[in-house]
Image: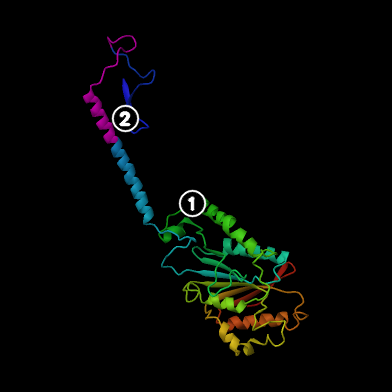
């Protein structure tokens, strides 16, 4: 007996049955006699029948594939930074890192890396947009150019399915979060918080903190967003531009009440930060109140910036001091 198989060249072919498959038939010999020869008509019919079955199976498979593709095309997809466009209000966190000299010491660098890993792994909600902006020379501009920009990963399949996206297993979601951090977020944060700046990225002339806060306040998805908004500021809080030199020039750090009456403040005034939670990691410089930082104290800097953000209508202001390997949290 013969059977038909589908060849690699795309055609059906006739082959012999494997050993032991034949049946003995009476009068046809001890081992089953001769195999009957099929007529061309029979061969054509079998080809047609089996081909039709294959076609049906193939079409069924194609239909299944088409359905999967159709279903996939109609499910919600993330954009290139992992954000989903939904009708739900999108939460936003923007971190502004003052990259001016002097940079972070070893302990401050370690603490900041740990704090920002917590932000990524623990604090970001699903689809919350997270951006990190630095003030090094290659990045300063009217429109901040983030070194990190992504959205928080889903913590469960239910979160994806709720917005119309394809679900996923918990193991996959956990691996995805780890991979994004290991491949993209972690290495960039290590560069941002490195104790040594790369050549060409040393900001040793100015520290335009207010100008950058103003730029952030103008971001389309940060101002007027209906979701929760957070601004993280990493800085020694010593504004240093051609117009203002906190701590190093006498009279340049008055009370905020006096400062906001100056023409310079009108140039750098941020848009309203109403509803924004502000968290400041203050890099406490040693020798505040002494040369060359003799014209300010730590208390004066803290009071100034708390009043600055209160004037901008921030919902809350939290200042965490980073020094000597430990941080001390101030009141809001």
What are the residue bounds of the magenta stretch? 26-53
Q: Horizontal and vertical percent for residue 315?
A: 55, 78
Residue 95 in percent (x, y) is at 58, 70
The numbered dot on residue 169 is 1
Residue 11 in sight in this render: yes
> Element type at marker 1?
loop
The residue sitting at 31% across, 38% down in the picture is: 57
Q: Is residue 63 left or right of residue 177?
A: left
Distance CA(mark 2)–CA(mark 1):
41 Å
Q: Which mark is residue 182?
A: none
| Depicted 206 relative to depicted 86: above or below | below
The image quadrant that residue 2 belongs to is: top left
Q: Is residue 161 magenta?
A: no
Image vertical order of residue 70 relative to residue 273, above or below:
above
Q: Is residue 122 above or below residue 144?
A: above
Mark 2 and mark 1 lie on one chain; the one further toward the N terminus is 2
Q: Is residue 103 left or right of residue 181?
A: right
> Which residue is identified by label 2?
12
91 vs 134, nearest the viewer = 134
- Residue 15 quadrant: top left
Residue nearest the viewer, comparing 248 with 193: 248
Seen in the image, is 190 located left or right of residue 63? right
What is the total number of numbered labels drawn onto the structure image?
Answer: 2
Task: Tell me if mark 2 has few (under 14), some (14-19) or many (20+) residues whose alpha carbon lies within 10 angstroms of its own.
Answer: some
The label nearer to you, 2 versus 1, is 2
Give the quarter of the figure containing the N terminus. top left
């Amino acid at each position: 007996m013969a059977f038909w198989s589908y060849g690699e060249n795309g055609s059906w072919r006739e082959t012999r049955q494997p050993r032991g498959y034949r049946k003995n038939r009476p009068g046809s010999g001890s081992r089953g006699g001769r195999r009957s020869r099929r007529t061309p008509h029979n061969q054509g019919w079998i080809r047609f029948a089996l081909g039709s079955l294959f076609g049906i199976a193939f079409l069924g498979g194609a239909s299944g594939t088409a359905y999967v593709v159709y279903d996939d095309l109609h499910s919600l997809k993330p954009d290139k930074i992992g954000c989903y466009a939904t009708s739900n209000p999108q939460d936003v966190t923007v971190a502004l890192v003052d990259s001016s000299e002097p940079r972070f010491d070893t302990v401050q660098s370690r603490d900041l890396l740990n704090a920002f890993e917590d932000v990524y792994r623990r604090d970001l909600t699903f689809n919350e947009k997270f951006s990190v902006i630095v003030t090094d020379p290659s990045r300063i501009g009217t429109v901040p150019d983030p070194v990190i920009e992504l959205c928080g990963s889903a913590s469960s399949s239910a979160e994806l399915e709720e917005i119309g996206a394809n679900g996923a297993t918990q193991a996959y979601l956990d691996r995805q979060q780890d991979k994004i951090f290991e491949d993209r977020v972690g290495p960039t944060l290590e560069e941002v918080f490195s104790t040594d700046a790369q050549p060409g990225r040393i900001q040793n002339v100015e520290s335009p903190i207010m100008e950058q806060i103003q730029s952030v306040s103008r971001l389309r998805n940060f101002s007027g967003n209906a979701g929760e908004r957070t601004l993280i500021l990493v800085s020694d809080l010593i504004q240093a531009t051609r117009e203002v030199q906190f701590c190093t020039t006498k009279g340049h750090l008055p009370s905020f009440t006096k400062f906001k009456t100056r023409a310079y403040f009108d140039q750098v005034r941020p848009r309203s930060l109403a509803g924004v939670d502000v968290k400041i990691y203050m890099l406490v410089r040693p020798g505040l109140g002494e040369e060359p930082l003799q014209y300010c104290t730590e208390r004066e800097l803290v009071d100034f910036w708390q009043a600055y953000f209160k004037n901008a209508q921030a919902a809350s202001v939290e200042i965490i001091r980073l020094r000597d390997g430990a941080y001390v949290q101030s009141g809001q």
